[in-house]
Amino acid sequence: MLNNLIIAAIPHTEPWGFSTALVMILCNLVAVAIGRFAIANPGGGPDLPVGKPDLFRNFNLPELLATMSFGHILGVGLILGLTNAGVI
């Protein structure tokens, strides 16, 4: 009986597909754009191991990890909300 209550409490989520991937990618891009211009002291950590354009001159590894984490939090919330609304 307890298993039935737990299963009933789990929200229905859309299986991973093109629409959920697109929402997650867009949320990560928005988070990087927000982080690029909102981080108070950029460039305070190890540099990325790849070349960067001049727009991301002071955008280092800690900023990348922080903005991608924020993007995934936004993406999960948006995917769950759009799934429950029936949009996805």
Image: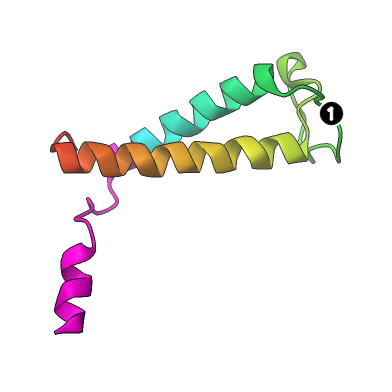
Tell me, yes or no, if residue 69 can be seen here: yes
In the picture, which quadrant includes the C terminus?
Answer: top left
Above or below residue 52? Residue 72 is below
* Amino acid at pointer 1: Gly
Residue 46 counted in the magenta span? no
Residue holding disc 1: 43
Tell me which colouring the rendered structure shows. rainbow
In the picture, which quadrant includes the N terminus?
Answer: bottom left
Q: In the rendered structure, which segment of residues is drawn in magenta?
A: 1-20
Tell me, yes or no, if residue 18 can be seen here: no
Q: Residue at x 75, y 25 (%)?
A: 52
Q: Residue at x 44, y 36 (%)?
A: 74
Number of other residues with Cα within 10 Å of mark 1, as a class: few under 14, some 14 to 19, many 20 or more: some
The answer to whether residue 34 is left or right of residue 12 is right
Q: Residue at x 23, y 62 (%)?
A: 10
Above or below residue 74? Residue 31 is above
The one of 47 and 1 positioned closer to us in this rendering? 1
Count of residue discs = 1
Q: Position of residue 36 (x, y in %)?
A: 67, 21
Residue 5 counted in the magenta span? yes
Q: Position of residue 75 (x, y in %)?
A: 41, 39
The one of 6 and 44 positioned closer to us in this rendering? 6
Give the quadrant of residue 67. Answer: top right
The answer to whether residue 75 is left or right of residue 5 is right
Q: Secondary structure at mark 1?
A: loop
The answer to whether residue 28 is left or right of residue 19 is right
Q: Position of residue 70 (x, y in %)?
A: 55, 38
Q: Residue at x 64, y 25 (%)?
A: 35
